[in-house]
Amino acid sequence: MRNWDDFIAIEAGKICNISEAEFTDLLKQNAATSKLLGASLDLMLNNLSTPELRNGITHQVVRNDPVQREWEATFSAVNMVGPVIISLAMQGFYAAAICLLRHELEGVAQLKHILDGRRSKKYAPSISHLEERMRKWYPALSESAHLSSDFAASMQAPLLGNPDNLALLPHGNSMLPVYNKKIAEEVIGIHIEIRKELIKRVDEHLERIGIKIPDAGAGTVITN
């Protein structure tokens, strides 16, 4: 009895090798975006107290804001999927990567709802406040995440696959991931744009908690 999980992993490894050669520039863009986000995160990390003036003496008071705690937990959940999205896209698992793209986009929208006190426990977050180009991505991301059309499913399991792929179901759909340059480029490109939006959310958060973001080239960080 053959282990198809092993075959899938082997094919994914082959696709990853192709992707690494094809997407050098995109991966550099993603790394640069992640570096920018990391710079903002470094300002946020372990910033557990805030200075407060009492009777002429400055005291470090432990932060205790339930809304901010909720915001930071949601941010962390969104931020951690970044490397996974890239890894899935590079290996040809496009449907799974798109599911996480939708999660990432909704998470960015949710961060605003938390601060506005409009987070819903029953419904997906409204994306109406996001830029128009991001709102346009949402229907396609949802279609793929829900596999609500044959087109969405066939994007991951295309008909006939490629000449090296002989693992086909009776109607011709591939049992193994198949490299698709166009889809991979779109997935990685959308991810980069969502990460840029996430940077804006983080920088807004830093301003709210009293951490000033230094200008380019500045050597010190000033906290209020």
Image (tube, rainbow, N blue to C red):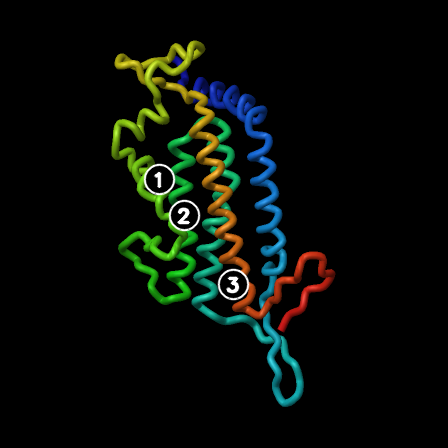
| Residue 66 spot, x, y in % from top left | 44, 68
Give the residue at x 37% y 13%. Answer: 167
User: What's the residue type where badge 3 is placed?
Assistant: His
Give the residue at x 45% y 35%. Answer: 187
- Residue 159 picture quarter: top left
Cα–Cα span, label 1 and label 2: 9 Å
User: Label for residue 141?
Assistant: 1
Q: Is residue 73 or residue 2 the one in the foreground?
A: 73
User: What's the residue type where badge 1 is placed?
Assistant: Leu
* Secondary structure of the residue carrying numbered label 3: helix
Which mark sits nearer the N-terminus, 3 or 1?
1
Q: Is residue 100 above or below residue 78?
A: above
Q: Quadrant of the C terminus?
A: bottom right
Q: Is residue 222 above or below residue 150?
A: below
| Residue 2 spot, x, y in % from top left | 40, 14
Q: Is residue 70 above or below residue 15?
A: below
Give the residue at x 30% y 58%. Answer: 121
Q: Are marks 1 and 2 in contact (CB under 8 Å)?
A: yes
* Secondary structure of the residue carrying numbered label 1: helix
Give the residue pinned by disc 3. 205
Crowd rating for badge 1 (residues with CA inside 10 Å; few <14, some 14–19, many 20+): many
User: Label for residue 105?
Assistant: 2
* Secondary structure of the residue carrying numbered label 2: helix
Give the residue at x 72% y 63%. Answer: 220
| Residue 174 spot, x, y in % from top left | 35, 18
Crowd rating for badge 2 (residues with CA inside 10 Å; few <14, some 14–19, many 20+): many
User: What's the residue type where badge 2 is placed?
Assistant: Leu
Q: Is residue 49 or residue 36 the one in the foreground?
A: 36
